[in-house]
Amino acid sequence: MHTFDLTLDRVTKIEGSAALEVKVKAGKVEEVHFRTTDYKRFYTQAMQGKPVIALPQLLARICGTCSNAHLLCSIEASERALGITPTPQTLLLRTLTMYGLMIRDHALHLYLFSMPDLFGKDAFLDFDENDPVQHQLLHDAFEIKAAGNFLAMLVAGRSVHAPYPMIGGFSHFPEEAGIREARAKLEAIRPAVIRLIKIYEEAPFHFDRRTNFMAMVPVRYGFLNGKICDSKGCMIEEESLRDHLEHVVLPYSQASAYKHEGEAYMVGSLARMNLAKDKLHPRTKETLGKTLDLFPSTDIYRNNLAQAVEILHSLDDAVEILSTQNFSPEPIVKGTPREAVGIGVIEAPRGTLYHKYHLHPDGNVIEGEIVVPTGQNQINIEEDIYRLVQDLLPDTPKEKIAFEIEKLIRAYDPCMSCAAHFLKVDWQES
Amino acid sequence: MAEQTPVKKIRVGWFSFSCCEDNTIVMTEVLNDHWQEWRKLLDFCHARVLKSANTLEEMDVAFVEGAIASDKQVRELKEIRRLAKKLVAVGACAVMGMPSAQRNYFNEHQRKQIEFLLARFSALPKVLKVAEVVPVDVEIPGCPMDPHDFLSKVNALVKDFQEGKL
């Protein structure tokens, strides 16, 4: 019977740093630990005593790739604490900021992290320019990413730690020439995005498992406002979300984990598509037709397809907003410091993101709490690895098991900034 | 017809320590416009965000982002320094420690809240900037780094390499 420990010191091609330990005894998986190995930077403590106006830019530094999601979630929580209602134009500019993020971030994951697995390559940059399909994909990837980056720069000033969005509005507004260029770039990548969707629709990887999916279901599939729903029919207001999550301490990890009603659950693109695909942009729905019938899905690898669909939706809705709205300078809406609790919830690329601040009457933070998507997916990921390894035993070679684990982890697109390329696989057989 | 001699590429490593990896993201955005040129010039021997088959061996240039938060990271950084001809500190956390080093400035109340976690994960008492651990040849400050500054420093290193000055 197989008895061994599998240690993956560093997961590669993910955001951040993660490791994995699997213990197998007499042919049975006994333990799975999926660990965040990034050292804590203590943002929850660091926000204490800071003026609320400093929070969005401070907390954007939690994550490089999800930076603008933290920024907007922090702004929302701060505005609610200060009693500020943003203008309709501000909400549209924030929606466009999210679309730039979704296009850029999902494309990074789908091309540079996940696609090498589909083509049997180590790295996306290893794709062969002399092969017509791979040549096309190389060009598609960087053109899509560049268009998302351009949109983010136009609207928010930067893709990472954007300077224009702030509490109460924006400090800069897109000009006509930039809007025209953004529309042209977005329309130009549409065929490439449709090719990407086709690739992930036909991808041969599958891992079917029942779980509860949770996402904010918006009026406009724009990632910013709505009610939080799950696949069991539960509906939660944004300010009550935390009451429905149970914090789980993992002594082996630098990160926190969460359960919902005592069980693991999944957040992210697949959850959003399962719960809100009818809210996609009409042009996206018309183009994709039967592809959308694949949702709802319990196949974790469909998270990749869901991300590709979200790129198309983001593109189509961004083009509509940029074609139909005029943007003009607006003053920043000011609030009054008061003792209050402000809660912000948005859909970040990897799922539901929660910021909560308790403000002192002087406008400084007494305490705060942040719940990130990967913490919510943590237990689901561990349960999946447990079953995956058990299913692969006893006949699969260990190297193949390690590869399959990494591949599945990458489908979740966890955010540890480097966690999907395992640096070292250390097998200890006993 | 004479066979073309393959151009020798610069061996490059990209390493992330304690930070949000914003510079990694900016680097992947710079790739949008420069990937074809970089494929000819650069050999990424170690870049976890780009590939799985990473090797830690002699390299021409090591780019290091993030601050240093543990003895293990100190050992890793010293090894990178030993193997690299040039070491470039990238981004605010690498160049000046902040914001990853914000716990260095916590008050007594905040320190008490985190001390059990520092002990559990064998973290250093103070978070260090890269230059406090190893000599740094080039600095690219910014949170995140400025892509134009990054490109101009990469181009200068490429020129040095091509002129045999590395």
Image (spheres, helix red, strand yellow):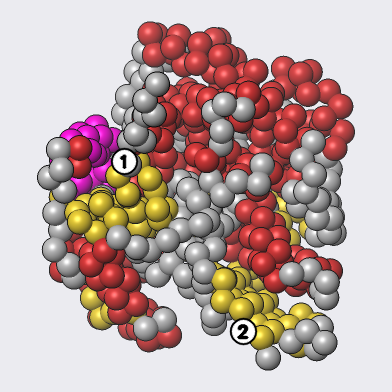
**Which residue is at a point 22% across and 35% down the rendered structure image?**
B155
What is the x, y in percent for residue A16? Answer: 47, 58
For the residue pair A373 and B74, the one nearer the viewer reads as B74
Whether residue A55 is visible: no
Per the image, the residue denoted by label 1 is B8
Q: Quadrant of residue B36?
A: top left
Residue at mark 2: chain? A
Q: CA distance from mark 1 to mark 2?
A: 39 Å
Q: Is residue A390 above or below residue A163?
A: below
| B59 relative to A425, above or below | above
Residue A206 place in picture, x, y as percent: 81, 51
Which corner quadrant holds the C terminus of chain A? bottom right
User: Residue drawn 41% across and 81% down?
Assistant: B121
* Towards the viewer: A104 or A228: A104
Q: Amino acid at mark 2?
A: Gln
Q: Nearer the viewer, residue A311 or A47?
A: A311
Q: Which residue is mark 2?
A: A428
The stretch of residues the image draws in magenta is B139-160
Residue B151: say if magenta.
yes
Provide the major secondary structure of the magenta segment.
Answer: helix
